Image (cartoon, helix red, strand yellow):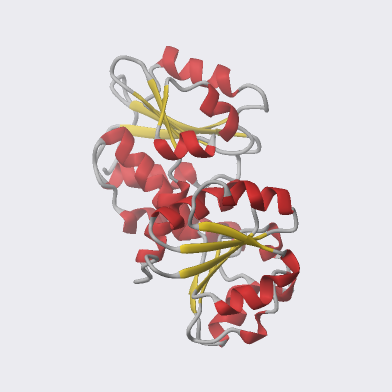
Amino acid sequence: MVGWAPDGQTRLAAVIGDPITHSLSPVLHNAAFRAADLNWMFGAFTVSAGNAGNALEAMRTLGIAGLSVTMPHKTEAALHCDELSADASQLRSVNCVSRTTDGRLLGDSTDGPGFVASLRDHNVEVAGQSVVLLGAGGAARAVALALARSGASVLVAARNEQAAQVVAALHAGIDTTAWDQRTPAALAANIIVQCTPVGMLGDPNLVFDASGLTPKHCVVDLVYTPLDTPLLRVADAAGAVTIDGLGMLIHQAALAFTAWTGLEPSISAMRAAALQELSSRTSS
């Protein structure tokens, strides 16, 4: 939409979090709105911890059509929605809130389905596959549940064994292994998913001993800054299929876009905008 400017009929969506200035959500959603020629705009609001309920109440009052929710609000937001999807209810976490025509707030968790969709972009189907998940945080929980529901056998390895057990309790298709067994477990699996913050550090072997990777493996790193993590570089050199975290980010946003507008977004427009933004951040 060339020359577009907001007016009195513009519909508003936004992301809440703290910190939020780094978020790619405005870039992704505004690109999707423009590609669909929609009179919508997407903003970002810094909302401090403990104020998610106030933000959702403002959503009702101001008629905001949709909210993306990021840290530290995903758990609290689930408590303030009128209704939760099956995933959001089970995970006790919300990253997408939709406002119905009668003002009700519907909470969903699109991270897991977004992750599975990102694998399909690379022709990786998960049904019947063995997956090792490294980490047991909020993203890992969403990913594990989506994988298990899609027919994968999931093994979780985390430094915090109690957190790993919480993930395993989500679905019968999820089990745990000890953190010191992560390397043999990962190398025996078809798909390896890196969900820990150490993926951004310089040594790929901080995650597991990646020297045994082969072309039979698919290695996914949920990190998207940088896109080319040390682990993915080693995996690529070994001939493995490699998938960065940007696909999951785009597809979870695409599911939110559909929930709010009833339309399918342009994934290509969203990806192009995200890559341009990441490039500009790197060069600045």
Q: Is residue 41 left or right of residue 155?
A: left
| Residue 248 rendering spot, x and y as whole percentages | 46, 56
Query: Residue at horizontal 56%, vertical 87%?
Result: 238
Quadrant of image for the N terminus? top left
Which one is nearer the viewer's eye here, 153 or 281?
153
Where residue 71 appears, as percent x and y from the top left, is 61, 38
Q: Is residue 82 above or below residue 136?
A: above
Q: Residue at x 32, y 22 (%)?
A: 100
The answer to which quarter of the image holds residue 52 is top right
Between 127 and 142, the one nearer to me in the picture? 127
- Along the horizontal axis of the image, is 141 left or right of 147? right
Q: Is residue 162 above or below residue 98?
A: below
Return the x and y of residue 96 as percentages of the image width and height.
44, 35
Of residues 281 and 145, which is closer to you in this image? 145
Q: Is residue 272 visible?
A: no
The picture places residue 99, in percent across and down from the top left corner, at 36, 23
Identify the residue at image location x=43%, y=63%: 152
